[in-house]
Amino acid sequence: MTLHSNTRCGSNINVLEVYDTSNINLPSLITQVDLIQPKGLGLYGNYLFVCDAGLVKIFDVQNPGTPTVVHTLEIDCHDVIISGNDLFAIGDTGLFRYKLHPDDITNITSESNIIF
């Protein structure tokens, strides 16, 4: 889950928190990663896409205790949706669609966009 401080709550925390939910009634925090201003996220196999301050950061989460950034996309968005091998990113300026390649997470192809 992401927590960010750009809200009216007055918080100044900006982190990605990874939880073990094997016991859904008692989730436990595994680790947290400091970020700039995280928002939406989406899971794609062993990769977690996180919107963070003008970028989509792609974390390898195969080992949930040590999420590692393996690639970034310069997309200023606040949420991502992943459906099959399609990545949809929505921001204040538009909706962007990308094709993901499961054998190479760094090979991401822009397919289309709608600019607002």
Image (cartoon, grey):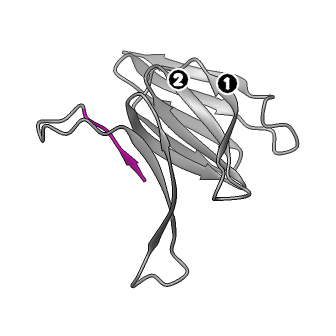
Number of numbered discs visible in the structure rendering: 2
State the image coordinates of residue 22 (x, y, percent, origin top left). 55, 80
Answer above or below: position of 114 versus 98.
Answer: above
Which residue is located at x 74 percent, y 57 percent? 62
Q: Note whether 110 is above or below 39 in the view shown.
A: above
Q: Residue at x 65, y 30 (%)?
A: 98
| Residue type indicated by callout 2 | Leu
**Residue 50 point in image, percent of width and height:** 52, 39
Q: Residues within 10 Å of mark 1 (few under 14, many from 20)?
A: few
Q: Please state the extent of the stretch shown in magenta in the rendering.
A: 1-5
Secondary structure of the residue carrying numbered label 1:
strand
In depth, the one of 21 and 44 nearer the eye is 21
Residue ID for mark 1: 111
| Residue beneath the point at 45% across and 81% down | 24
> Position of 26 compared to 67: left or right?
left
Give coordinates of residue 58: x percent, y percent: 64, 37
- The residue at which mark 2 appears reads as 55
